[in-house]
C-alpha cells in the first residue's frame, strides 16, 4: 500500500484531494490531527520553511502512547457529543500537528521519508491559520396562533447553544472560523397589514403563511436583524423561494441567504445534524463572500458542488470545505 496522509474525520480540516496533494489547516497556537496510512517504517518530519529559517513554523508529534493519545481522545469526545459515529480509523499512525507561526498560504511541508530508499513517499502541506471570529444571531420567527397569541413559527425546540456547537464543529476545524452567538430573541412578525402587503394581496390583512417566502419577506426581516452580529438567520417551519402573483411561493427550499442584507432563513428539519448542516450551508453563503485577502465582494458564495459531502452542495448541505475555498474565501488569515 502506498503511503498517504489521511483525514481523521470528514470535517477535521484535512483535504485529501487538495491540488498538489493532501493538505490541512492548523489553528495558530493550536493543534489538529492527521493520520498516515501505509507508512509504518517511514520517518515523518517537517521540511524547513523558507519563511521561518530559524525553526519550522509547525511541530508534528506522533501519538504513540496513552498520554499523547489522550489529547486526541479529548477532541474525539467533544466531537462524539454532537456526532456519535465520529470514530478514529484504526491501522494507521496518528499525529498531532501544532501551529506555531503562520507562514502564508503555501504553508509548511511534512514529509514521510524512507531511510532505506532515501525517498519521500508521502507529503502533506500544512497551513497555519489565525482565527476569524464571526458573530451570528439565530432568531425564531414569531407569528400568532389560532387564539391570536404570539407563537413560534418553527415547530422545533430552539437550542441555540447546541446549534452554535454544530456550526463550530463544521467550520472551525476546516477554516478556523470561530462562531459566537449574538441575539437569540424571537423575531415577531405580527403586523397583519404589513404581511398582506408583503404577500401582494388585495385583502387588508393576512397572517403569516406556513411557507414564508424569502423574496417577499426579506425586506421586512432585514429591519429586524441583529446589528451587533455579522449575520442574522431566522428560523421557521418552512421557507419558500420565488414569487407568485397569488402570494404563494414558487418552491419550498431548505434555506436562503442574502449576503447584501446579511440575513438568511432556514426551514425546520427533524434531523438535527442535517438541520445544522443546512444552517452552516446558508451561513457559508455569507462567510464565503471574500474573494481576495481583506476584500469583500458582497456577491455571496455560490453552491459549487454536486458531491453531497460538500458543504456547498447544490440543493443540500454536506460538511466538507476544500482547503482552496477556505484560503480564498472563508479565512485569509494566513
Image (spheres, rainbow, N blue to C red):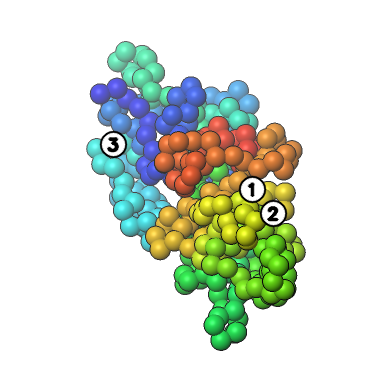
Q: How many marks?
A: 3
Identify the residue shown where x is 48% and y is 63%. 268
Identify the residue shown where x is 43% and y is 29%. 17
Measured Cα–Cα span from mark 2 to mark 1 = 7 Å
Measured Cα–Cα span from mark 3 to mark 1 = 37 Å
- Give the position of the C terminus as an image quadrant: top right
Q: Which residue is mark 3?
A: 92
Closer to the N terminus: mark 3 or mark 2?
Answer: 3
116 sits left or right of 52 in the view: left
Q: Crowding near pointer 1: few (<14 within 10 Å), some, many (20+)?
A: many
Q: Which residue is mark 1?
A: 286
Q: x%, y% of residue 237?
A: 51, 66
* Element assignment for label 3: loop
Q: Which residue is mark 2?
A: 262
Question: Eyeballing the image, is 234 above or below 26?
Answer: below
Q: x%, y% of residue 95?
A: 38, 39
Marks 1 and 2: in contact by CB < 8 Å?
Answer: yes
88 sits left or right of 148 in the view: left
Amino acid at each position: 500500500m502506498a503511503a498517504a496522509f489521511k483525514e481523521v474525520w470528514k470535517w477535521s480540516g484535512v483535504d485529501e484531494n487538495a491540488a498538489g496533494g493532501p493538505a490541512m489547516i492548523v489553528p495558530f497556537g493550536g493543534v489538529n490531527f492527521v493520520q498516515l496510512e501505509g507508512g509504518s517504517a517511514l520517518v515523518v518530519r517537517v521540511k524547513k520553511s523558507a519563511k521561518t529559517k530559524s525553526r519550522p513554523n509547525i511541530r508534528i508529534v506522533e501519538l504513540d502512547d496513552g498520554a499523547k493519545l489522550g489529547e486526541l481522545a479529548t477532541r474525539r469526545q467533544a466531537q462524539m457529543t454532537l456526532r456519535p459515529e465520529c470514530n478514529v480509523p484504526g491501522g494507521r499512525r496518528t499525529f498531532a500537528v501544532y501551529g506555531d507561526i503562520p507562514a502564508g498560504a503555501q504553508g509548511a511541508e511534512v514529509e514521510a521519508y524512507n531511510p532505506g530508499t532515501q525517498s519521500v513517499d508521502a507529503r502533506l502541506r500544512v497551513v497555519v491559520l489565525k482565527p476569524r471570529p464571526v458573530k451570528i444571531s439565530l432568531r425564531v420567527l414569531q407569528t400568532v396562533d389560532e387564539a391570536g397569541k404570539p407563537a413560534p413559527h418553527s415547530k422545533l425546540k430552539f437550542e441555540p447553544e447546541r446549534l452554535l456547537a454544530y456550526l463550530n464543529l463544521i467550520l472551525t476545524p476546516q477554516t478556523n472560523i470561530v462562531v459566537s452567538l449574538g441575539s437569540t430573541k424571537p423575531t415577531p412578525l405580527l403586523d397583519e397589514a404589513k404581511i398582506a402587503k408583503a404577500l401582494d394581496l388585495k385583502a387588508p390583512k393576512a397572517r403569516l403563511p406556513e411557507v414564508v417566502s424569502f423574496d417577499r419577506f426579506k425586506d421586512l426581516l432585514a429591519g429586524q436583524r441583529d446589528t451587533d452580529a455579522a449575520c442574522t438567520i431566522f428560523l421557521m417551519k418552512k421557507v419558500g423561494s420565488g414569487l407568485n402573483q397569488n402570494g404563494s411561493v414558487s418552491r419550498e427550499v431548505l434555506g436562503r441567504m442574502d449576503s447584501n442584507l446579511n440575513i438568511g432563513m432556514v426551514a425546520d428539519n427533524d434531523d438535527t445534524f442535517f438541520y445544522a448542516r443546512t444552517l452552516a450551508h446558508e451561513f457559508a453563503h455569507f462567510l464565503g463572500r471574500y474573494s481576495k485577502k481583506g476584500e469583500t465582494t458582497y456577491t455571496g458564495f455560490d453552491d459549487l458542488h454536486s458531491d453531497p459531502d460538500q458543504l456547498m452542495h447544490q440543493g443540500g448541505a454536506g460538511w466538507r470545505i476544500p482547503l482552496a475555498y477556505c484560503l480564498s474565501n472563508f479565512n485569509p488569515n494566513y
